[in-house]
Image (tube, rainbow, N blue to C red):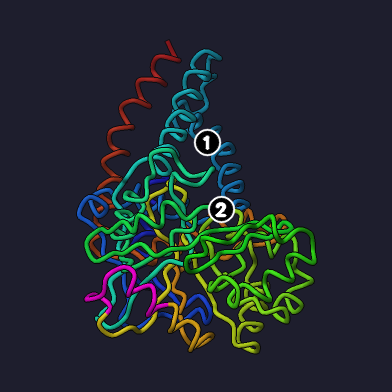
Amino acid sequence: AAAAAFSVAILASRFFPHPRIIDAATGVPVPGAGLVFPAAHLLLTPFSSLADLLTCSGLSQLGALLAYVVAGFPFIIWLAWGRCRVPWRACCLAAAVYFGAFASFLAWTASTSRPAARLVLEDPELLAFDFHSHSSVSWDGRSHFSPEKNARWHERMGYGAGFLTDHGREAGALMRARAGDYATLVGREMGLEGLHIVLLGSSPSLDPDAYPGPEGLRRFIERSERDHGVLTILALPEYWKKAWDRLDELADWGVDGFEILNAFPKSLDMGVDERRRVIELCRSRGLIMAGASDNHGWGSAACAWNVIRLPGWRGWGSAERERRLLAALKRERFRAVSVLGRDRVETSRGLWVLTDPPKAIWRMLRGWSGFQCLVALSWLWSLTLAAIPIGRQLQAWQRH
């Protein structure tokens, strides 16, 4: 019955197709932009797609999904044993297998270089880039995620450039790692007064200790471009959590932009109304809207890209690409960048977040191609047919 219900849902989703990529500011599909999936991702469609969903979920949504997993264990027991009384040892073994499989899936999702989709843009003059990511140079970067691996990951996800913004250090970015058409650009992430500020461009003489306290924060933002030649982007989730009532003040001081989409789970908890407020602030003040992978070396799927028109970018080296990109950002400001993101269910508030996992799964199904639906149905019924004799043996063992 469960397999039949899932099959109906998969088939029904074909009548309600949904875009995979949207403009994060408007919520509408983006013509000429799409995701291309490697063969391994397609052959593992139900598992890879669910892993992508987890990677692009907010922290509250992941908690809600965990609640479903825990609540689903009694249902699994009922499917296996029916109305028979379940021995406690068998129940413990089943729990170990069930939760062990879930933990293994999470580890595969977060810790391995699994197959993931790549952004493809039809217009060759458009550059997809990342405002904010990390490497092993950061104190919280994954130990094996070197600047070179950071570059390879970005190239695999369809980026043509990205600012490597390790915490307080430019050493990794200055290596200017390359991978295919991808070029690493120089930046860093700096903390002041509880806020995280992404600095775009090199600032070797900058000492954060020279800007202590609230007055130091104001002074730095006011002088960042004049004294250090960098653009300042306020990162999520810190400004949302710690300076939400001061956004206009920060804009008055001269901050250059705000992240409106950040793939870190805590940041993805930001609600749609809050995002709209920041977008409107950027529009009214002429500030840069930014999307960030904020990748620290965990997870394989990308959830956010920034697209800017830079004709001829493939022919430029890393330094020239950085110079031209920064010049375009300074010149065009709000109009410079389109922030693209995977179409995901926005995080609901309070207990309503419990409705997010089923909505997210339904949206995932609606984004599948016909081939992906066929692959998913094949996996579903293969696993179901394999499980039926196991369940019958368990019930027969219990009766005897």
Q: Which residue is mark 1?
A: 75
Q: Is residue 150 visible?
A: yes
Q: What percent of the width, then of the height, locates residue 129?
A: 39, 70
Residue assigned mark 2: 168
Q: Which residues are magenta?
A: 313-325
Which residue is at the far front? 205
Q: Nearer the viewer, mark 1 or mark 2?
A: 2
- Within 10 angstroms of label 2, few (less than 14), some, or many (20 or more) residues? some
Residue 318: within the magenta?
A: yes
Q: Quadrant of the N terminus?
A: top left
Q: Where on the picture, by quarter, is residue 145? A: top left
Identify the residue shown where x is 55% and y is 79%.
288
Q: Nearer the viewer, residue 253 or 382?
A: 253
**Is 346 positioned to the left or the right of 107 in the image?**
right
Residue 188: percent from the left, percent from the top? 52, 59
Front residue of 396 and 327 = 327
